[in-house]
Image (tube, coloured by chain):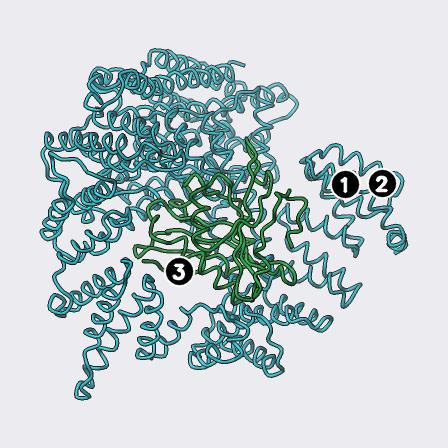
Chain colours: A cyan, B green
């Protein structure tokens, strides 16, 4: 304890001495921080905080073992001073050893019982590991030490969580006990007049609702105390309780009052209409009372709002349509009571068609009418817009109406049946409308605004995709891409245009263009998770490796940071006693850490690194070890993987009857998870090959078990492929432009991935055991290499041939196949270099070791020298095949772009020089993309040739 | 036609149609979580009948004594849902909450160049309280207007007597 007293006396002095260490750590100068801490420790060898900081510096420098030892000795001294504890818990958080923080503070509290600050830290350390029971105990100690409301409610919420989230929450009787206890705790507090804040009031209501005590909740919510403490209680709480209580009449009346004051609230209208339907059920039972039909009253009320509003709001009109729709669903006479549906839609269109949200609004009601009625309605709206095939919109409002009518027609399926020449004429008209709108109404556009007529061009791009798809050629879509790029020059902030362009670039395998659009979108922070799918998922096997890695880096940086921070967010809700957000934060943490995007990017980045290795064998192995792949350990929580994609961000007006967004989401997600299965297993299997020769884990394994992991993974590998073939997944439908591109699942199944790695597994095993079948296995692997090389060469030939007809339509597939071939060969090259290194070393040292394990059947294993020779042969062969690939890639031609585009935009009032640079720029992007890819792939091959030549 | 509801963590995954707007900043997670944890009722979202996010407002309440006030940190509306009075709805929600919390006024900062926004706030009853020099840093620093509107608790409207001279951020006490 001596040094602690010393510290107490001179804390200001030590604070000053420690400062340089902190400062250096803060700016990331870890080496200097280490030096400073060592300097300080020379003078004051017992200064705990300095030792802890030394541990942190070592940790940051990646010297894990030393750091570990250092921190361990500090922890063993059971420190109690805040700064040392802070540094230690910071380190443990970084290392994800959260239970050590608990221990740390437990010791500290034991030595300083009743210390508020230490107890609070101990509480938060329990929060991090979600130990609700321990939380409860510490919170009560805290309350005893310092009777603050916060601490009391920390214990209340800890009891609640034991009932609804903890290990016992699955048992109904336990749940009941915990929730009952929590309620009594708050009841007692209320009785003593100690309830103070709105979050406390919220928590009480929450506890009552969890126990289905709705009447009590209602009384509390409408009582005096709640009004005083929680004046901002959302009115939706009242709805919820009245619904639970079946008090439809009161709900109905409450909503009428609310709607009178606030006439544009969809949440109110929705509840109001529902309550009217519920009341109808009641009245039909008690019709003799002579009560008027609640739906008639509802209609009257809505009409009253419409009639008495000076400024037209969408609310009551949409509500009336909703009433109509719901009545039809219940086979009630909607038309008689509310009116003619088509006329109501047309009226709505007349009033609000000039707002861009009108399309979304009308679309809500289309699924409830027949296809025939939809298309008839779409024609009526077009007529209503007043723009015909021979006239142009007279003002911005009319143009917006026209756009809305066109979007609705597409949603109603009106474009799908049109013949090709019709669609082409339609496209030309859209293009003209775009240009007319831009030059007439878009002149004074701010750089932050979207052009008023941009939506014409977006629609045009969709139409051109339909055409391309129908005819299986790229011309139309390429033209659409040029149009979009033209729009982007005029309205630089239109993200819809960027998203569609990004999609088209990917579809045509143009990674440079895609990357440009991705950067232009400025996707960052959490968008890297929710929007990353538009780019990241399409990069692997897209044809490039190094560019891909940079995109992953940015994404992974976001994820690692948020992973580190994830528990601190939850701690924050405790600090501010925000009980209403705690569960939400916990669920959010789960969603973020289990993001498919996160896991997939990590795996792809590792594969990418292994494929692109270019150093000497020692460097490569060091890089490999730093990746710390644990083949035996499946670190992915497969059942928790979360789909965080914001698929709705990409705007679409595709025919409603052909779109099933939920199904599309599910299908693509399922397939992406399967792709991840393949990729992560491939990575682990490959790592098990390497580890058998260079790993540490196989050395630890008991004799004869070194190959257990490898064999197990190999079995999973073939099992996985077998299952995937049986599952019979269909490639994602490519019906519309905004559909997600096919996942790599079918590519991985079609190409010889399975056999390639399965045979490699056998080769690695045979080499190790010196099996008599080694020569045979070498032959098999060699044949696979030939197959893969031929795949690469043939694909390139095919791609070159395609140039004669259509250089773009199949470009992406071709690039994928070439990239996949090179991926397999590159990994193989890495493996051979590892095996070769090992066998050469061991055949030199072999003479000293006597082979003792004679096989039972008497056959001698093949000598190491022979094995080495066979390996040499494989190396020679691979080198040769890599050269063949290189020769083919050298002949790979840039995609020839579709027909002459000189007529493109001739109808527009464009200056010829604008036109020339535009098409020139788009074409150059494709050329650049190819010209970047080819040397990159050739460098990759060159590296591999060098790697095996050594 | 709008549903107003508290902004939740899950909305962070779905707000792209709003946040792709060039004037809307996408902040780091800790920024959002701090607001959600500290002032949950000040972070509200407007949702369309089809379930799309139309816009949201993010704010806080802080200050001592007669400086206790609501503050608008971010207000944004998706391009598809403009000219519907949504910003006004979200602002009135925040003012309402601030009234309930017995705040004296509501304030906000806006770029001096953002005339559209300044007009809107003026129409909602906000005045330019003072100019803060070089508040926005970037390629070119920009001044901000600190705009204010008094709430009912400030009976004498003391909070909205404008400054006569521009100030620097470091010269004013934000609390």
Q: Residues within 10 Å of mark 1 (few under 14, many from 20)?
A: many
User: Tag 1, which chain?
Assistant: A
From the image, tell me which residue sits under label 1.
Answer: A54
Question: What's the distance in space between the residues labelled 3 and 1, CA to CA?
Answer: 52 Å
The residue singled out by tag 3 in the image is B4
**Residue B72, can we see it?**
yes
Callout 2: few (<14), some (14-19), or many (20+) C-alpha neighbours within 10 Å? some
Return the disc, 2 or 1, that comes first in the chain's sequence. Answer: 2
Of circles 3 and 1, the one toward us is 3
Do the numbered discs 2 and 3 sit on residues whose CB atoms are within 8 Å?
A: no
The answer to which of A882 and A921 lies nearer the viewer is A921
Residue A47 on image: x %, y %: 84, 47
Q: Tell me: residue A237, above or below residue A611.
A: below
Tell me if mark 3 has few (under 14), some (14-19) or many (20+) residues whose alpha carbon lies within 10 angstroms of its own. Answer: many
**Circle 3 chain:** B
- Residues flagged by tags 2 and 3 on a common chain: no
Q: Secondary structure at mark 1?
A: helix
Q: Is residue A366 placed above or below A382 in the rendered structure?
A: below
Same chain letter for marks 3 and 1: no
The residue beneath circle 2 is A41
Q: CA distance from mark 2 to mark 3?
A: 59 Å
Residue A734 lies left or right of residue A111; in this view the side is: left
Q: Classify A884 as above or below A59.
A: above
Location of residue B36 in the rendering, given as x and y in whole percent from the top left corner: 52, 56
Instruction: Give SS at disc 3.
Output: strand
Which residue is depicted at the point 32% across and 27% down? Answer: A485
Between the C-alphas of marks 2 and 1, the distance is 9 Å
Q: Are marks 3 and 1 in contact (CB under 8 Å)?
A: no
């Amino acid at each position: 304890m001596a040094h602690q007293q010393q510290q107490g006396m001179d804390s200001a002095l030590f604070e000053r001495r420690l400062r340089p260490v902190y400062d250096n750590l803060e700016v990331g100068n870890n080496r200097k921080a280490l030096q400073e801490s060592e300097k300080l420790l020379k003078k004051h060898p017992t200064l705990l905080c300095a030792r802890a900081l030394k541990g942190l510096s070592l940790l940051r420098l990646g010297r894990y073992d030393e750091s570990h030892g250092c921190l361990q000795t500090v922890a063993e001294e059971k420190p109690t001073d805040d700064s040392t504890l802070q540094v230690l818990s910071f380190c443990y958080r970084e290392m994800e050893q959260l239970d050590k923080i608990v221990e740390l503070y437990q010791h500290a509290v034991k030595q300083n019982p009743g210390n508020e600050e230490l107890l609070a830290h101990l509480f938060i350390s329990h929060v991090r590991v979600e130990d609700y029971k321990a939380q409860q105990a510490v919170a009560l100690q805290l309350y005893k030490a310092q009777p603050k409301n916060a601490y009391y409610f920390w214990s209340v919420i800890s009891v609640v969580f034991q009932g609804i989230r903890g290990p016992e929450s699955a048992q109904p009787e336990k749940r009941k006990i915990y929730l009952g206890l929590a309620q009594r705790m708050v009841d007692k507090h209320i009785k003593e007049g100690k309830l103070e804040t709105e979050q406390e009031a919220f928590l009480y209501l929450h506890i009552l609702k969890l126990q289905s005590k709705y009447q009590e909740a209602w009384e509390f919510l409408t009582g005096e105390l709640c009004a005083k403490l929680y004046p901002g209680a959302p009115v939706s709480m009242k709805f919820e309780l009245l619904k639970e209580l079946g008090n439809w009449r009161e709900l109905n009346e409450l909503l009428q009052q609310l709607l009178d004051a606030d006439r544009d609230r969809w949440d109110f209208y929705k509840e109001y209409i529902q309550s009217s339907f519920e009341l109808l059920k009641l009245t039909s039972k008690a019709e003799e009372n002579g009560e008027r039909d609640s739906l008639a009253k509802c209609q009257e009320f809505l009409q009253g709002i419409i009639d008495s509003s000076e400024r037209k709001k969408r609310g009551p009109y949409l509500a009336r349509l909703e009433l109509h729709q719901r009545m039809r669903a219940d086979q009630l006479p909607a038309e008689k009571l509310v009116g003619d549906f088509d006329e109501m839609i047309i009226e709505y269109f007349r009033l609000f068609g000039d707002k861009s949200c009108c399309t979304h609004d009308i679309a809500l009601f289309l699924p409830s009418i027949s296809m025939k009625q939809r298309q008839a309605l779409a024609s009526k709206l077009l007529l209503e817009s007043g723009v015909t095939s021979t006239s142009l919109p007279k003002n911005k409002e009319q143009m917006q109406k026209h756009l809305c009518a066109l979007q609705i027609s597409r949603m109603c399926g009106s474009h799908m049946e049109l013949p090709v020449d019709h669609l082409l004429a339609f496209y030309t008209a859209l293009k003209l409308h775009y240009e007319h709108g831009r030059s007439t109404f878009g002149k004074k556009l701010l750089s932050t605004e979207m052009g008023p007529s941009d939506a014409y061009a977006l629609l045009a791009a969709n139409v051109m995709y339909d055409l391309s798809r129908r005819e299986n050629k790229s011309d139309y879509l390429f033209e659409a891409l040029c149009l979009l790029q033209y729009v982007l020059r005029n309205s630089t902030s239109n993200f819809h245009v960027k998203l569609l362009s990004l999609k088209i670039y990917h579809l045509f395998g143009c990674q440079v263009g895609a990357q440009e659009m991705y950067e232009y979108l400025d996707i960052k922070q959490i968008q890297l998770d929710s929007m990353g799918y538009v780019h990241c998922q399409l990069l692997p096997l897209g044809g490039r490796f190094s560019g891909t890695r940079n995109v992953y880096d940015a994404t992974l940086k976001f994820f690692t940071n948020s992973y580190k921070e994830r528990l601190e967010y939850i701690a924050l809700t405790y600090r501010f006693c925000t009980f209403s957000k705690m569960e939400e934060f916990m669920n959010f943490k789960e969603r973020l850490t289990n993001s498919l995007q996160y896991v997939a990017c990590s795996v792809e980045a590792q594969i990418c690194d292994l494929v692109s290795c270019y150093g000497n064998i020692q460097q490569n192995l060091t890089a490999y070890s730093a990746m710390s792949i644990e083949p035996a350990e499946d670190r992915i929580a497969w059942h928790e993987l979360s789909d965080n994609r914001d698929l709705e961000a990409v705007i679409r007006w595709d025919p409603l009857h052909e779109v099933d967004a939920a199904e599309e989401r599910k299908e693509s997600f399922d397939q992406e998870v399967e792709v991840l299965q393949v990729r992560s297993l491939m990575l682990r299997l490959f790592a098990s090959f390497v580890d058998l020769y260079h790993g540490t884990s196989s050395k630890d394994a008991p004799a004869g078990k070194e190959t257990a992991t490898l064999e197990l993974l190999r079995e999973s590998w073939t099992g996985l492929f077998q299952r995937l073939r049986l599952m019979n997944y269909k490639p994602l439908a490519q019906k519309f432009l905004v559909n997600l591109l096919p996942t790599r699942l079918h590519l991985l199944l079609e190409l010889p991935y399975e056999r390639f790695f399965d045979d490699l597994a056998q080769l690695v095993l045979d080499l190790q055991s010196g099996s008599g079948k080694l020569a045979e296995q070498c032959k098999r692997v060699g044949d696979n290499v030939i197959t893969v090389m031929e795949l690469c060469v043939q694909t390139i030939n095919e791609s070159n041939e395609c140039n004669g007809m259509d250089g773009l339509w199949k470009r992406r597939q071709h690039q994928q196949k070439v990239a996949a071939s090179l991926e397999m060969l590159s990994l193989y090259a890495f493996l051979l270099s590892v095996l070769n290194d090992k066998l050469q070393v061991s055949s030199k040292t072999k003479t000293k070791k006597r082979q003792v394990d004679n096989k039972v059947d008497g056959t001698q294993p093949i000598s190491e020298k022979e094995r080495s020779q066979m390996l040499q042969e494989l190396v020679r062969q691979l080198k040769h095949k890599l050269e063949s690939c290189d020769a083919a890639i050298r002949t790979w031609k840039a995609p020839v772009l579709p027909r002459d585009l000189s007529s493109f935009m001739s109808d527009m009032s464009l200056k010829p020089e604008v036109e020339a640079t535009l098409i020139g720029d788009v074409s150059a992007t494709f050329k650049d993309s190819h010209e970047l890819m080819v040397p990159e792939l050739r460098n990759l091959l060159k590296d591999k040739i060098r790697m095996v030549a050594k | 036609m709008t549903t107003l509801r508290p902004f939740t963590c899950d909305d962070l995954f779905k707000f792209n149609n709003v946040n792709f707007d060039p004037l809307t900043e996408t902040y780091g997670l800790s920024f959002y979580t701090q607001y959600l944890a500290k002032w949950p009722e000040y972070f509200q979202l407007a949702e369309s009948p089809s379930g799309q996010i139309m816009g949201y407002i993010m704010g806080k309440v802080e200050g001592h004594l007669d400086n206790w006030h609501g503050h608008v940190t971010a207000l944004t509306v998706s391009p598809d849902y403009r000219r519907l009075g949504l910003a006004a709805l979200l602002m009135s929600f925040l003012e309402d909450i601030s009234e309930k919390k017995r705040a004296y006024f509501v304030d906000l900062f806006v770029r001096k160049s953002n005339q559209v926004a300044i007009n809107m706030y003026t129409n909602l009853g906000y005045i330019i309280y003072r100019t803060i020099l070089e508040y926005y840093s970037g390629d070119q620093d920009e001044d901000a207007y600190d705009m204010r509107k008094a709430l009912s608790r400030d009976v004498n409207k003391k909070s909205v007597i404008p400054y006569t001279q521009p100030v620097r951020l470091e010269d004013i006490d934000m609390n």
